[in-house]
Amino acid sequence: MYVALLSNSVTLFAVVASLLNELQIQNSELGRLALSTALVMDILSTVVTSHVLVLYNNTGFLAAFTMFASLYSMVVLIPLLCRPAMFWIIKHTPAGRPVGTIYLHMIVMLVLILGWCSIKIGQDFVLAAFILGLSVPEGPPLGSALVKKFRFFGHHFLLPIFVTTSVMKDALALSLILNCKGAVEIGIYCTLYDAEIISGGAYNVMIISVMIIASIAQVSVKFLYDPSTKYAGYQRRNIMNIKPYSELKIIACIHKPHHISPILNILDLCCPTPENPIIVDALHLVELIGSSLPLFIPHGLYRKNSSYSDDFILAFDMYEHDNVGTTEIHTYTAISPSNLMYEDVCHLALDKVVSIVLLPFHQRWKSDGSIEFDDKYIRTLNKKVLEISPCSVGILVTRTNINHIRESSITRLAMIFLSGKDDREGLCLAKRASMNPSIQLVVYHLISEGRDCRKENESLHDKVILRDIDKGTRNVTYEKIILNDGPQTASFLHDLVNEHDYFIVGRDHDSTLPQIHGLSDWTEFPELGAIGDYLSSQDLKTNASILVVQQQVSKK
């Protein structure tokens, strides 16, 4: 019976890691907390078990006796010495008068001193404070004075926040995870049964309990915990709402070495200047293989480079050095399961309050137009980030390696504008790029001859952002293109695709727009939208790169 009780009071790290992997939340905040807690539980259970075995075998008794003697002495001496002192304070307090403030301050200092002593004997700080609290006489004048002194902060602030609100669901989910049993426990039970330490009845009960607890835990945790809720947008995190002469915060995601150069080109396209700097959080995403514990490494704090991040860190450090005063870069490495990498991306975006996340497209082409690289896990990541990201998202489709944008050369940039918030977000980025005089920007406004199908507010927003688009700037051209259906749009883009080095397009458009009618029906990659998907088609022989922009998705 004691063996059964002890085994059910401890959950091993390997079982927790396996459960979280099945639930696909091991990379979330709750998952990390569960893994950390299970790891601590493993350590503590090992310590307790070793002490029990020492006492059971009558070896090393003196060391164990010394430890327990210190603990018992503290438990006895605190009430024996402090409680009479409390009564002395009460005795010297005049009837009807409050306890002197000096005495209350002394009690607080005593809590800190006893907590330090508790730590010195190898116990927790809270233990001594708890024993001292039990020693305080209840009621007035001392007990009530202490309650009154700390009531507001403890009762009206800490208690409602930490007990009666959001943590309750997480705590319940965490408790279910940490009480789950699995294959490791079943193996232990079989060993105990074979050694005749437990009876057949106890063995059957323990095996059935493993099945029941595991079933309840998985269903309940999925119901109680949704890691995506923390990404709900309660503030505007996009390029449109950046104030003039303020920094643009970007997350740049890297999977493979060939993603580095195109991402750096886009950073150049963002036109960092001392008046409008950019702050880049560069995130190297590495698949977790051969381990159960995901890692997130901030290289600004941990400068010992990992072999898989050397080139990544060096490239961004050099870029920051070449753009000192205009660009600030922080590098990170996230080692996670491929199907959970989006958690690292979105959590970093939420924590750093960035305006846009840059993601590489999952395909890469050779110079002859054939596909060189295709990773379905990157595509899954991109789709998930588009769904739950707390800020705007840009997917970069790269054809060939293009040299960095330099002031001495001309970069031809095109913005394909139809209507909608994604197009307006992309146009804001294009406007920022046009601040670089070496970038020639052409804004193609695709309109139809028929009745305007746009909603009234959308039409108004479009007019505002397009107003004075080409006034006062020599390197910006605005063209209205009349197109009445999808085939005309496809023909126009086909003729245009080799006239520019970069295209910026919005992802989502109103399906009633005649300009894209028919294009959306043939979309191969919905994450790129109708225009982005066509420009990225393998049938188009071009070296131009395409940045597909989605503005921050509002979540209610």
Image (tube, rainbow, N blue to C red):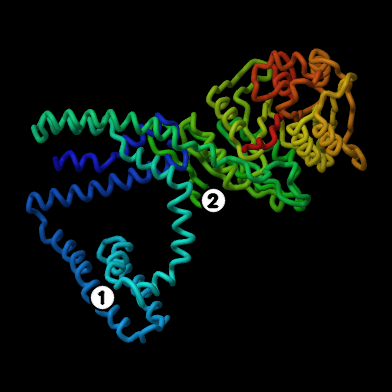
Q: Which residue lies at the image location 42% right of the left edge and 31% below the top edge?
A: 23
Q: Which residue lies at the image location 54% right of the left edge and 34% below the top edge?
A: 342
Q: Which residue lies at the image location 60% right of the left edge and 19% below the top edge?
A: 372
Give residue 523's position: percent from left, percent from top: 68, 16
Q: Is residue 242 above or below residue 290?
A: below
Q: Is residue 53 left or right of residue 39?
A: left
- Label 1 SS: helix
**Numbered label tally:** 2
Within 10 angstroms of label 2, few (less than 14), some, or many (20 or more) residues? few
The label nearer to you, 1 versus 2, is 1
Q: Residue 475: tell me if it is visible.
A: no
> How much space separates mark 1 and mark 2, taking CA atoms?
51 Å
Q: Is residue 532 left or right of residue 444?
A: left
Q: Quadrant of residue 119?
A: bottom left
Q: Which residue lies at the image location 64% right of the left edge and 25% below the top edge?
A: 527
Residue closest to the eye, 397 or 78: 78
Q: Answer with mark 1 or mark 2, whichever residue precedes in sequence.
A: 1
Give residue 354's position: percent from left, percent from top: 64, 44
Amino acid type at image mark 1: Arg
What residue is disc 1 on?
A: 83
Image quadrant where one finds the N terminus: top left
What residue is disc 2 on?
A: 300
Give residue 268's position: percent from left, percent from top: 72, 40
Amino acid type at image mark 2: Gly
